Amino acid sequence: MSNFHTVRKAASDKIPTPRYTDVLVKADGRIPNIIDDIELALREGVSQQLTEFSKDFPPTRAGMQKLWTWMKRYITYNEDGEAAQIIQEPARLNQTRRGDCKSFSLFIASVILCHKKPVSLMYVHYPDTYSNHVYPIAHFREGEVIVDAVWKRFDEQKEPFELIKEQLFKI
């Protein structure tokens, strides 16, 4: 068994079993509704689901790279269709092991907030693809760290983009 598999197993075991209500399904997936739903989940304390899990991913650039790598290896990116937009709370995403940028961002932002560090959610539009996207940026003493587990490289973002909204969260 590889060392990384052991870390994944140990980290995943620290996330509680999800409730059946841990999935928000929205027929109307327009950006304002998505923003409201993600932000409401964070304000209501969904990050508490990852209190123990977050201890394996310290609030540093290296810790966020470890989290980014964990997400890339163990959570499959699966874009929602046009019929419905799904936002999974962290415990549900850990169980299903698949989600899109909304669920990825909620999960990563929750880890950062568990460390009582600020996190921004970047809601952007890519004019070349007609698609919208959300991803987190961690704010640490050593600087900002982009933690977009959908993108192919750590601490980078796809460009060019048009910023729709940037929302900062602090605990």
Image (cartoon, rainbow, N blue to C red):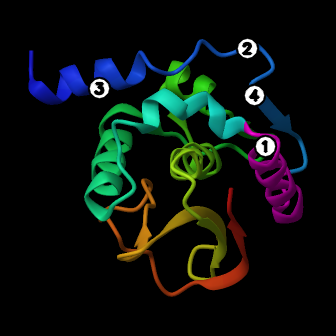
Disc 4 and disc 2: Cα gap in Å? 9 Å
Query: Would you call the spot at circle 1 few (<14 residues within 10 Å), some (14-19), or many (20 or more)?
Result: some
Query: Would you call the spot at circle 4 few (<14 residues within 10 Å), some (14-19), or many (20 or more)?
Result: some
Tag 2 near tag 1, CB within 8 Å: no
User: Which residues are the magenta region?
Assistant: 29-45
Question: Which amino acid, by three-letter code, is at mark 3?
Answer: Arg
Q: Residue at x 72, y 40 (%)?
A: 87
Disc 3 on helix, strand or loop?
helix
| Residue 23: mark in rendering | 4
Q: Is residue 39 above or below residue 18?
A: below
Q: Which residue is mark 2?
A: 19
Question: Which amino acid, by three-letter code, is at mark 4?
Answer: Val
Q: Which residue is mark 3?
A: 8
Q: Residue at x 74, y 47 (%)?
A: 42
Q: Is tag 3's residue or tag 1's residue first in the polypeptide sequence? A: 3
Q: Residue at x 44, y 38 (%)?
A: 54
Disc 2 on helix, strand or loop?
loop
Give coordinates of residue 14: x percent, y percent.
45, 20
The kind of secondary structure the magenta stretch mainly shows is helix
Q: Is tag 2's residue or tag 3's residue first in the polypeptide sequence? A: 3
Q: Nearer the viewer, residue 99 or 19?
A: 19
Q: Nearer the viewer, residue 130 or 34?
A: 34
Find the residue positioned furthest to the left.
2
Query: Would you call the spot at circle 3 few (<14 residues within 10 Å), some (14-19), or many (20 or more)?
Result: some
Disc 3 and disc 4: Cα gap in Å? 23 Å
With 14 as the anchor, is 68 left or right in this view? left
* 99 in the magenta segment: no
Give coordinates of residue 168: x percent, y percent.
69, 70
Front tag of 4 and 2: 2
Q: Is residue 162 above or below residue 136?
A: below
Query: Would you call the spot at circle 2 few (<14 residues within 10 Å), some (14-19), or many (20 or more)?
Result: few
